[in-house]
Image: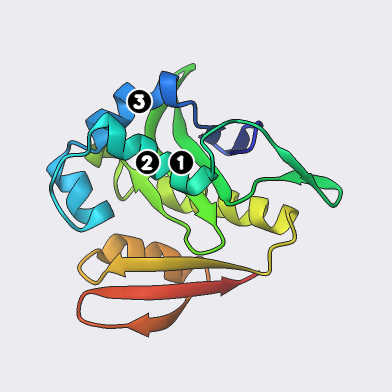
Amino acid sequence: MTSKKNIYRYNVKLRPINLKRDMSKMLKWYSNKKVLYYSEGHTTPYNEKIITKMYNSITKDGHQKVIEKMHDSITKNGHMYIIEILSGNKWLSIGDASFTRTSTPITIGIPEYWGKGIGSQALRLLMKKAKHYHWKELKVSGIATYNKRSLRMYKNAGFKVTNKNKKEVKMILRL
């Protein structure tokens, strides 16, 4: 399950994922060895089955239904979005982002958009959404130690290291 509303910050939009509409873009991103290396820690391309499984694990049952909880609608497990940027007068899909109780991954799937602050803007939107749902914290379940851009992005947003080893860093942000 995922939120039904778009959220915006400047020229960045997080749009709820729609697997039928977005699968071809996601297959392209998750077939790029450079993207996979930094986002997943390996270079083995994903197929449609793996992407669907990834989506379903975040959204619990893979449907776009919403459960009423307290006064807001909130999903069972988390929210998953497509990251879009405004290019001229069109929105261009360039990656995905999600937040769950255990992780806040952001993937910019087109390397030419790396290092331009888009991930930071997407992260700010996720933080705002988590606060809206009265979440007390956001976690990062593991960033590869060699992924300096991602580490810097999360640290600059206020995330603190909770665990670090040779391979990865885990972080948390108290909201």
* For residue 1, above or below residue 175: above
Q: Position of residue 24 (x, y in %)?
A: 30, 22
Three-letter code, disc 1 = Asn
- Mark positioned earlier in the residue sequence (2 or 3): 3
Q: Position of residue 103 (x, y in %)?
A: 47, 61
- Mark positioned earlier in the residue sequence (3 or 1): 3
Q: Secondary structure at mark 1?
A: helix
Q: How many marks?
A: 3
Q: Secondary structure at mark 3?
A: helix
Q: Residues within 10 Å of mark 1 (few under 14, many from 20)?
A: some
Q: Is residue 154 left or right of residue 61?
A: left
Discs 2/3, front: 2
Alpha-carbon distance for marks 2 and 1? 5 Å
Residue beneath disc 2: 53
Answer whether labels 2 and 3 touch (C-beta < 8 Å): no
- At 44% across and 66% down in the image, what residue appears? 140
Regarding residue 159, the answer to whether it shows in the image is no
Q: Residues within 10 Å of mark 3 (few under 14, many from 20)?
A: some
Q: Nearer the viewer, residue 128 or 11?
A: 128
- At 47% across and 58% down in the image, what residue appears? 104
Res. 23 mark: 3
* For residue 67, above or below residue 119: above
Residue beneath disc 1: 56
- At 37% across and 35% down in the image, what residue appears? 52
